[in-house]
Image (cartoon, coloured by chain):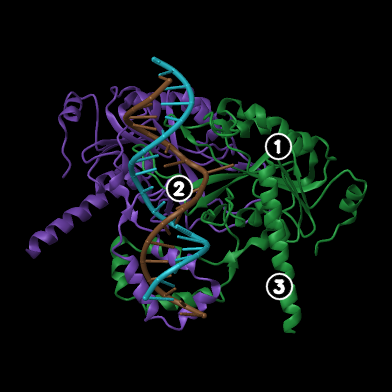
Chain colours: A purple, B green, C brown, D cyan
Amino acid sequence: MTTTLNRELSEVVSSNRLNIDTIIHGDCLTILKTMPDTCIDFIFTSPPYADNRKKTYKGIPTNRYVEWFLPISNELRRVLKPEGSFVLNIKERSEGGERQTYVIELILAMKKQGWLWTEEYIWHKKNCYPGKWPNRFRDAWERCLHFTKKKKFKMFQDTVMVPMGDWAEKRLARLSERDKIRDESRVGSGFGKNVSNWLGKQYVYPTNVLHLGTECGNRGHSASFPVTLPTWFIKLFTEEDDLVLDPFMGAGTTALACIQLKRHYLGIEMMEKYCDLAQGSINKWNERINNNNNIRQLSF
Amino acid sequence: MTTTLNRELSEVVSSNRLNIDTIIHGDCLTILKTMPDTCIDFIFTSPPYADNRKKTYKGIPTNRYVEWFLPISNELRRVLKPEGSFVLNIKERSEGGERQTYVIELILAMKKQGWLWTEEYIWHKKNCYPGKWPNRFRDAWERCLHFTKKKKFKMFQDTVMVPMGDWAEKRLARLSERDKIRDESRVGSGFGKNVSNWLGKQYVYPTNVLHLGTECGNRGHSASFPVTLPTWFIKLFTEEDDLVLDPFMGAGTTALACIQLKRHYLGIEMMEKYCDLAQGSINKWNERINNNNNIRQLSF
DNA sequence: GTTCCGCATGAATCGATAG
DNA sequence: ACTATCGATTCATGCGGAA
């Protein structure tokens, strides 16, 4: 491991009150209750969505979702450091032709619980499923609800800056339909010149709308979100060696993001199948890193 | 006028119970109460957002917003036809470091009132207000809440289809930061080729995320949303000659969209200043249309 | 007739200052 | 202590004037 333990974290770990860089198999609420107060720097998770279909292995019924989640969010608030953040990736499905309301009810309930609802980021899924229904289009976005314990919290905005203006989009915006056609015939000259002007421009701060594709590579598992999603928030809300918690770890995507960013992780997952899957991904990644290191050593 | 009156609408209008293709100066709730039942095909509006700052000429305080809006939405439901839709464009500001909750409270309250919350579209504002703060990024999106009276409602999805794959976005999504820089050196070849691919592409259904810039700048008036926003929804939820209502007409953007799409409109606006502004825009547009017709007649 | 550059203008938000 | 006001910050866009 290239990550290190800061003194604070080191004490908690050595006293055996906290596992880190592992995936714990078990019930989220039970495990959370064994953890010490204010030891987590950042929480990112995508909990199971509400689902009334009985067949689903562990769908929580819509009308009981809030009461199911509140004890968990209460524990999350307890284990989170005062300056920490909690990002909840969630999106209500539609049922009987209407959007379900349990997510917005949850926001109100968590505020009563003491959380601050600081912001709602939009994850725009660029390459989402095609599909069409008589009363709606494809659902191409999910909520990333940002909760904190205090008004002031850790945030490192410089780490997620983006190139100024979306150069291709910007160019397109100015071109009329006719101009687009005209430009086709004189590629190479005028067009290229302009593109070079846009590059090398400053970086600017992003907005609260994230444009990320869904992960298309189905390597035997289906992660509910791409690794770039937790990556963005982890860069934004933590520093190296910080400890990130995902209480519904699933396929281990949050853990992978942590490893890549040199953050410590702690995952909780109830299904053993997913624990194994996540650990497999992690091992695979670590192997690749080691191989790369070896190659680098050989080539010098 | 190129629009016509269908029999149903014609009866209501001739009996003097309903004005159409006008902007009525007055209080929204008062005017609504004079209108007959089920005469409107579609409602699009962007009401004044909640604002606790006293100086603002008529901001509705956050904690009283829901009770202020409910009587209005009740009338809106009454005047809307059974198969009609209501799209509410709104976004809560942040206050005291948190997002306000009155919008999500309004959704829950309107459901109790009998509305169906069918969908939440996202308007992604490409050019959002600038600024930098320690705890958040620029707010680049607004809600377009879709309410209906019944599960089945009028929707014409084919009218808003878009060219398959925005090639620029798609391309950007795939490019890593390094690839973007590399692309600089091979502009001219691949770039123009893609432009030509755009043409003749198949059309596909859009998603529930709309990418539109705000119309800012020196046009003499400032509309809070671009004409393309109501245009999109009017095409989606109405046919020609249908009647569209905007109970908070403002600068008249919804009316302009209607005229361009050959729909009838009915606007309500409390501030005389805005009534004049809206009527001015409408007259200007109609003049331009007439001029164009003249030119066309001359050139043939 | 083009293209380029400068500039005003936003449904913003926070922190400091003043009452 | 609590509330109202003001200045600083920031960036995509469209317009007008200049080359």
Q: Earlier in the sequence, mark 2 or mark 1?
A: 1
Q: Which numbered disc covers residue B214?
A: none
Q: Is residue B108 visible?
A: yes
- The location of residue A127, given as percent across then percent down, is 48, 58
Q: Decide: few, some or many residues near mark 3? Use Cα within 10 Å; few <14, some 14-19, many ≥20.
A: few
Disc 2 or disc 3, which is closer to the eye? 3
Disc 1 or disc 3, which is closer to the eye? 3
Q: Is residue A213 visible?
A: no
- The location of residue A241, given as percent across then percent down, is 21, 38
Q: Please count the marks in the image.
A: 3
Furthest toward the left, the residue is A300
Disc 2 or disc 1, which is closer to the eye? 2
Q: In the rendered image, which residue does mark 2 sit on?
A: B129
Residue at 75 percent of width and 75 percent of height: B294
* Spatial separation of the CA atoms under disc 2 and disc 1: 32 Å
Is A260 left or right of B65, judged from the image as shown? left
